[in-house]
Image (cartoon, helix red, strand yellow):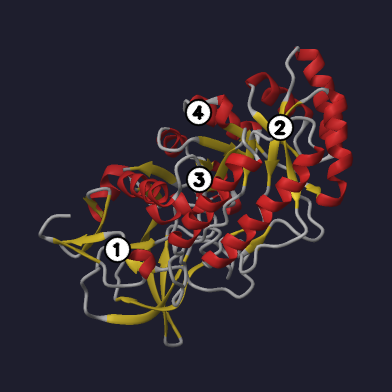
C-alpha cells in the first residue's frame, strides 16, 4: 500500500482493501480503472494478493503435517482454482465438472477428493479412472464402485463420509448430525465398512464435515475433537488402516455488523494436539482440513453500476445493472432466514462525507432483487459503482444467472 492509500476504517469485512483518490482499490487498481479494464459491469473481482495472504495465514496457524485442502465449490472459477492448486495441498470437488476443472488446473489426483450425495454412475467412472479419492455416501455407491473397479481394472480409492451423531454448534449451515442427506449414519458404519472390504475397494479413511460458516473457535475445536474420536472408534472396523482423515472445516467469515473474525489460534493448538495423538493412534494417517469460504470469501468483491436514481415516497432507490441473478446470497435468498445486508459501499465515493439512507436494487422485476436495504451509503449518482464485499465465495456460480434473461456477469482475478 502506497503513502497515498489508506485502509478502510469501516466494517471488519472491508478493511482488507485500501482507498486511493477516493476510490476502492482492488488488485492494485482504482475501481473505475478496473471497470474499464474488465470492459463491462457487473463483474466479480478476486484479489490474488488477498488469496495468497489468506492461505499463508492459515498455514501459519496449522501445525506441520496437517494438510490444507480447498473446497472448490466455494469458488470454481478456473483461474481461482489454478491459483489455489499451487498454494494448498489438495482440492475437494463435488461433481465431475469440478473434477475436470481441478485436474486441468494441475491438482494432484492423489490429493483430490470427490464428495456429494448423488454421484451418477458416469461420474463415479470418471473418478475411478482419474484415480482420485471418492467419499462414499451410500451403500449404492459401494455396489457401483465394485462393478466399475472390475470393469476398469482399477480398485476405487475410497473414504467414507460419515454423518456423525453430533452437530457443529453455532454453524450457519449444519451438514452433519441428525437425519441428513449427506454421508452414512454412524450407526450404519460397521455394515458399510464390511461391504467395502468384501468389494475389494481401496479404503483410505473418513470424511467428517459437521457444518459451515462458524465464527466460534471453541465450537470448531469441539467438533474436530469429536470427529477425531469418532474416526478412532470407526477405524477398529475398517478393512484397511486409516490413511486419510478429513476433519472438515466450518471456518466462517464476518458478514454482518457485530460479527468478529474467527480466532485461528485455539484451532491450531487443538489440531496440534490431535496430530500428536494421531502419530501413535493412527500412525499411517494424514489429517486434512477442508476450507472453501474461509480461503476465498473475503478476497472477492461484486461490482455493479448505478443506472438510475429514484425517490419513492421519500425513500431513495439506487437501481443497479446487477442483482440477485448474479449474487443470490447478497440478496438474502441463499439461506438467510432473516435478511441482513452484506457490507456494501459506493466504491467510487469512498471519501465522500455526504451520506444518505438508501436501498440498492437490481434490474429484475421482483422485490427480491435487493442488494442493500436502507443502508447508510455515500450519496451516489448514475454512473457510480456500488461494491458488495465478502463476495469471493458462493457468488456467480451459486446464482441463477439465466433468470429473466439479463446478461451474465464477468469474473476476473487481479
Callout 1: SS: loop
**Which label lies toward us, 4 or 2?**
2
The residue labelled by disc 1 is 347
Q: CA distance from mark 4 to mark 2?
A: 25 Å
**Marks 4 and 3, how far apart at CA:** 15 Å
Q: Give the quadrant of the N terminus.
A: bottom left
Q: Position of residue 172 (x, y in %)?
A: 61, 65
Q: Residue 320 or 351: which is nearer the viewer?
A: 351
Q: Residue 107 — which label?
A: 4
Sequence-first disc among 2 and 3? 3
Q: CA distance from mark 2 to mark 3?
A: 33 Å
Q: Quadrant of the C terminus?
A: top left
Q: Earlier in the sequence, mark 1 or mark 4?
A: 4
C-alpha distance separating marks 1 and 2: 54 Å
In the rendered view, would you say 304 is above or below 356? Answer: above
Q: Where is mark 2, residue-wise?
A: 241
Pointer 3: what residue? 75
Residue at 29% of width from left, 75% of height from top? 378
Asked if the residue at tag 3 contacts the one at tag 4, i.e. Cβ–Cβ closer than 8 Å, the answer is no
* Alpha-carbon span between mark 1 and mark 4: 36 Å
Above/below status of 16 relative to 71: below
Instruction: Tell me if 122 is positioned left or right of 3 in this view.
Output: right
Q: Residue furthest left?
A: 3
Which mark sits nearer the N-terminus, 1 or 3? 3
* Residue occupying image coordinates x 38% and y 49%: 60
Image location of residue 48, percent across then percent down = 33, 44
Q: Residues within 10 Å of mark 1 (few under 14, many from 20)?
A: many
Amino acid at each position: 500500500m502506497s503513502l497515498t492509500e489508506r485502509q478502510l476504517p469501516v466494517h471488519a469485512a472491508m478493511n482488507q482493501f485500501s482507498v486511493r483518490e477516493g476510490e476502492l482499490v482492488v488488485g492494485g487498481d482504482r475501481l473505475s480503472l478496473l471497470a474499464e479494464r474488465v470492459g463491462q459491469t457487473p463483474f466479480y473481482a478476486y484479489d490474488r494478493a488477498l488469496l495468497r495472504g489468506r492461505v499463508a495465514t492459515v498455514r501459519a496457524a496449522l501445525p506441520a503435517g496437517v494438510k490444507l485442502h480447498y473446497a472448490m465449490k466455494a469458488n470454481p472459477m478456473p483461474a481461482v482454482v489454478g491459483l489455489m492448486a499451487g498454494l494448498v495441498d489438495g482440492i475437494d470437488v463435488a461433481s465431475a465438472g469440478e473434477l475436470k476443472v481441478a485436474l486441468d488446473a494441475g491438482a494432484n489426483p492423489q490429493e483430490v477428493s470427490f464428495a456429494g450425495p448423488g454421484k451418477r454412475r458416469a461420474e463415479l467412472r470418471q473418478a475411478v479412472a482419474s484415480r482420485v479419492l471418492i467419499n462414499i455416501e451410500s451403500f449404492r455407491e459401494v455396489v457401483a464402485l465394485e462393478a466399475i473397479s472390475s470393469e476398469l481394472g482399477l480398485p476405487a480409492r475410497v473414504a467414507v463420509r460419515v454423518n456423525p451423531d453430533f452437530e457443529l454448534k453455532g454453524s450457519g449451515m449444519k451438514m452433519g448430525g441428525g437425519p441428513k442427506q449427506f454421508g452414512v449414519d454412524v450407526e450404519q458404519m460397521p455394515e458399510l465398512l464390511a461391504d467395502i472390504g468384501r468389494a475389494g475397494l481401496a479404503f483410505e479413511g473418513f470424511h467428517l464435515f459437521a457444518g459451515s460458516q462458524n465464527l466460534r473457535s471453541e465450537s470448531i475445536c469441539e467438533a474436530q475433537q469429536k470427529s477425531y474420536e469418532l474416526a478412532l472408534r470407526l477405524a477398529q472396523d475398517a478393512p484397511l488402516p486409516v490413511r486419510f482423515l478429513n476433519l472438515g472445516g466450518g471456518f466462517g467469515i464476518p458478514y454482518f455488523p457485530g460479527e468478529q473474525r474467527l480466532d485461528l489460534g485455539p484451532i491450531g493448538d487443538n489440531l496440534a494436539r490431535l496430530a500428536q495423538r494421531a502419530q501413535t493412534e493412527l500412525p499411517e494417517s494424514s489429517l486434512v482440513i477442508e476450507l472453501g469460504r474461509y480461503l476465498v470469501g473475503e478476497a472477492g468483491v461484486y461490482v455493479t453500476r448505478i443506472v438510475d436514481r429514484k425517490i419513492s415516497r421519500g425513500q431513495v432507490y439506487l437501481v443497479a445493472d446487477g442483482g440477485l441473478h448474479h449474487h443470490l446470497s447478497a440478496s438474502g435468498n441463499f439461506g438467510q432466514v432473516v435478511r441482513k445486508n452484506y457490507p456494501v459501499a459506493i466504491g467510487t465515493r469512498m471519501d465522500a462525507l455526504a451520506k444518505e439512507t438508501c436501498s440498492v436494487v437490481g434490474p429484475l422485476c421482483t422485490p427480491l432483487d435487493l442488494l442493500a436495504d436502507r443502508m447508510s451509503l455515500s450519496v451516489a449518482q448514475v454512473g457510480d459503482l456500488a461494491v458488495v464485499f465478502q463476495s469471493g465465495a458462493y457468488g456467480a456460480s451459486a446464482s441463477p444467472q439465466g433468470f429473466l434473461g439479463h446478461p451474465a456477469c464477468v469474473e476476473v482475478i487481479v
